[in-house]
Image: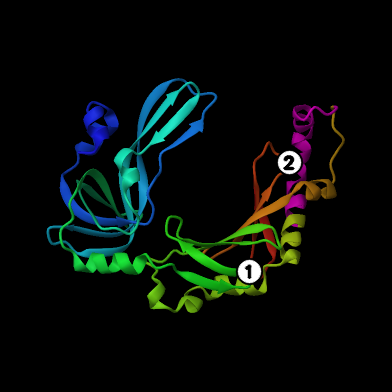
Amino acid sequence: MLSIYHEFPDHPAVQGALAQDEVQFHFMVAAVPQKKLVNDPYAEDKVVIHSMLMPGVALRMLPDGDFVAGVVNVEYLQLFHTENKRTLWDPREVSDMEPFKVYRARGSYFYSEIRQEPYVTVWELLEPLPDPEMEELAERAAEPVIVDTSIGQMVFDRSTNSFNGRSEELGVDLGIYYEGERILLADEGGLSKKFKSALGFVNNVLSQEYLDNARRLGAEKALPTANRWRHEVADAEGRATPAPKLEVDDVYAKLTPTAVIVPHRGNILVEFDDGYMFGGHPLTVKTKRDGTPTSIDL
């Protein structure tokens, strides 16, 4: 058993996990969690255990279940230990795992009819059995998947299911998301066809003019909210209150584009830093794929 099960046998999260029917399975993940220490100035000293998810890419129920390649939700228990206003995020042995390696586990299985995705919970890691099909996929999945765009090459991140890149010229991060059921592999090709709409947007629409138009709509739509918040913001920044009424150009000057998110289908999202007009909450402008800005989320 993983150490967290031994050390906290009476914890509700541990008991809840072990209450499920026991199974064994092979699985493979695209990324593993790492131990980290974060500042938590308002937290009290405590120990908490939560169920967390790793992005799985393959699963086989043992001894002779079907091979599943695609989205697999791999659950594990993680310890959060807060002491002296700092919290240790501790996945224990799970952080020693490696991406794109075949593992065998004892744990539980659940299939979500709502999400149409399998979930497995890892109780114990065991020596894997021979599984040529999964071992072959591990080698193929480890190869980077890359698309060429007008801002340069973008590499697929399996932990987020997105191609990620950055336009230094425009000063924004860019993400193209994949929502298909099949695992994306470099040796299968056809990426330009699979992502025709997204690549068309990046290569032909994304520009300084596009960002400026989104920024202008964001300023116009956010102006009423900015005026409602202006006195609180001025007070927090040590400026005189009541603060003068803001105009569209004042809001426009505060907004800074930081990221462009391209879903597999539907509206493009442009995220803006708010310049602390809204207490540090980002503003998102939705646009059509032809570049026309339509609405905001704040």
Relative depth, front residue between 240 and 135: 135
Query: Can you identify the residue that label 1 sits on?
Result: 151
Placement of the N terminus among the 4 image quadrants: top left
Range drawn in magenta:
217-240
The residue at the point 77 percent across, 51 percent down is 220
Instruction: Tell me if residue 182 can be seen.
Output: no
Mark 2: secondary structure: helix
Q: Which mark is residue 225?
A: 2
Sequence order check: which comes first, mark 2 or mark 1? 1
Relative depth, front residue between 4 and 282: 4
Mark 1: secondary structure: loop
- How crowded pointer 2 is (Cα within 10 Å; few <14, some 14-19, many 20+) is rated as few
The residue at the point 45 percent across, 69 percent down is 145
Q: Amino acid at mark 1?
A: Ile
Position of 39 relative to 58 (above/below)? above
Q: Is residue 284 left or right of residue 235?
A: left
Q: Is residue 217 left or right of residue 24?
A: right
The residue at the point 67 percent across, 55 percent down is 295
Q: Kindly indicate the quadrant of the structure image that contains residue 94.
A: top left
The residue at the point 16 percent across, 61 percent down is 65
- Taking the magenta stretch, the answer to whether it contains residue 25 is no
Q: Is residue 176 left or right of residue 31?
A: right
Distance CA(mark 2)–CA(mark 1)? 34 Å
Where residue 20 appears, x then y in whole percent? 19, 41
Where residue 221 appears, x then y in whole percent? 74, 50
